[in-house]
């Protein structure tokens, strides 16, 4: 009988494992768990860093936008107009103009033969200014007169024929139709003569325009032609201005009176005019007329003052000051001269409202005191006026108002 294998060897194969036998399995799973935790931590750090970076960039963008907006809004310095005591004398700027002024054009075509008055000449109404050679008009007039003689001869023949046919009709020697035809021919000849006479008179008038006369008394202020120059009639593109004449006695002075004083300006009241080139001298004038209407753009009354100028001391085109004795004490205000804006719309100032927005105000300027200007209309004492305004300021533009300095006299 074969020998049985030892039982001890089977028992050795069936013995339970000891705790130490599981140690290699636990060591393999632990690194995998730690790897997942590490990856999660790295992802969390990356997400946190990305969120922080995004927030920082968003804050920087918002700060930059706010800074850009703040820079885009300009900062301006403002002053308030200063109230001045009232004065019963109103002084306004005025422009001196000729009472009458007219350019002189030719009424016929030709060449300038000679001129008789030069620039600065004193002239009287009807004085001969220039002579024009008109060969074409001369020939046309001669031809028109010859044609008139032809028409006149034809008229005489038509009259004889009409009378003859009328006598023959009485004896029934000709028909009534033949007599009527001769009578009609006579009437046509009369009409032709009238047309020829009109043409001759037209050319005679053109012929008379070869001599240029002064339409009124005054001063010849400009001469634009020389002998030999081609002269074209009319004031169109082809026409050339020959002379300029101005009547300088009296002179017209146009003044824009502010609305506050308009009711005190009446036709016939006296006014005096002063000019810088005549210090201490006053020229007496009279209010000739007013527009009787306030200009809505400037809130002023257009007024004309006539000033005698017998010695031609005052020159047209000059600038002067007109003094009115209004008898009222209307308050006046002044602003610094550096607050002015001069644009196509006229003199303006920039005013800042309570919402720190700019409004452009048209104003009426009175006297110039050097550093300040008298404002006769368009501003109130309570307004905030921008000094040294930029040319880029626009209506309704928001601004930052700078704090006034301690040395600002108008703060």
Image (cartoon, rainbow, N blue to C red):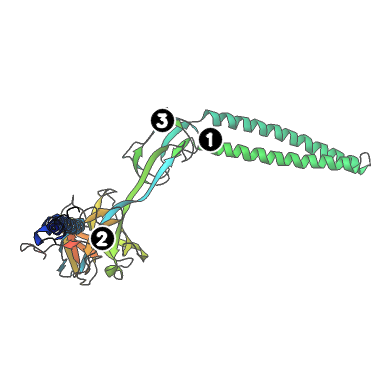
Q: Is residue 114 above or below residue 172?
A: above
Q: Is residue 215 left or right of residue 261?
A: right
- Indicate the position of residue 292 as horizontal and vertical percent values: 37, 66
Q: Which mark is residue 207?
A: 1
* Residue plotted at (80% across, 42% down): 184
For mark 3, what is the residue? 114
Whether tag 2 and tag 3 are in contact, CB under 8 A, the answer is: no
Q: Which mark is residue 318?
A: none
Residue 357 falls in which quadrant of the image? bottom left
Q: Element type at marker 2?
A: loop
Q: Element type at marker 1?
A: helix
The first of marks 2 and 3 along the sequence is 3
From where the camera sits, is residue 370 visible? Answer: no
Question: What is the CA distance from the residue labelled 1 to the residue labelled 2?
Answer: 66 Å
For mark 2, what is the residue? 397
Q: Quadrant of the N terminus?
A: bottom left
- Indicate the position of residue 37 as horizontal and vertical percent values: 15, 59
Whether tag 1 and tag 3 are in contact, CB under 8 A, the answer is: no
Residue farthest toward the front in the current orientation of the protein:
1
Residue 262 falls in which quadrant of the image? bottom left
């Amino acid at each position: 009988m074969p020998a049985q294998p030892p039982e001890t060897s089977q028992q050795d194969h069936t013995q339970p494992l000891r705790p130490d036998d599981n140690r290699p399995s636990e060591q393999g799973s632990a690194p995998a768990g730690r790897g997942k935790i590490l990856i999660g931590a790295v992802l969390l750090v990356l997400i946190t860093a990305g969120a922080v970076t995004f927030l920082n960039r968003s804050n920087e963008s918002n700060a930059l936008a706010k800074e850009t907006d703040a820079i885009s809004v300009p900062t301006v310095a403002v002053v308030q107009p200063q109230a001045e005591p009232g004065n019963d004398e109103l002084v306004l700027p005025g422009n001196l103009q000729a009472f009458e002024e007219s350019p002189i054009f030719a009424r016929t075509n030709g060449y300038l033969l000679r001129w008789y008055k030069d620039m600065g000449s004193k002239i009287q109404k009807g004085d001969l200014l220039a002579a024009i050679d008109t060969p074409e008009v001369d020939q046309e007039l001669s031809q028109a007169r010859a044609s008139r003689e032809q028409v006149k001869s034809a008229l005489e023949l038509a009259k004889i024929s009409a009378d003859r046919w009328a006598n023959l009709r009485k004896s029934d020697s000709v028909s009534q139709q033949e007599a009527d035809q001769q009578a009609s021919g006579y009437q046509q000849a009369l009409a032709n003569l009238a047309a020829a006479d009109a043409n001759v008179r037209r050319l005679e008038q053109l012929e008379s325009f070869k001599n240029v006369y002064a339409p009124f008394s005054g001063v010849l202020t400009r001469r634009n032609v020389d002998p030999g120059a081609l002269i074209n009639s009319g004031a169109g593109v082809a026409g050339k201005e020959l002379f300029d004449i101005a009547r300088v006695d009296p002179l017209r002075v146009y003044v824009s009176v502010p609305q506050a004083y308009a009711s005190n300006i009446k036709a016939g009241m006296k006014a005096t005019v002063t000019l810088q080139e005549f210090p201490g001298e006053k020229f007496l004038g009279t209010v000739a007329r007013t527009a009787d209407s306030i200009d809505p753009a400037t809130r002023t009354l257009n007024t004309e003052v006539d000033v005698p100028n017998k010695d031609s001391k005052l020159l047209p085109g000059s600038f002067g000051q007109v003094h009115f004795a209004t008898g009222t004490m209307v308050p006046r205000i002044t602003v610094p001269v550096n607050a002015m804006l001069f644009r196509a719309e006229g003199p303006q100032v920039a005013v800042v409202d309570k919402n720190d927005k700019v409004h452009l105000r048209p104003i009426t300027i009175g006297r110039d005191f050097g550093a300040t200007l008298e404002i006769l209309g368009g501003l109130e004492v309570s307004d905030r006026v921008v000094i040294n305004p930029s040319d880029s300021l626009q209506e309704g533009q928001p601004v930052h108002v700078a704090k006034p300095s301690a040395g600002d006299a108008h703060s």
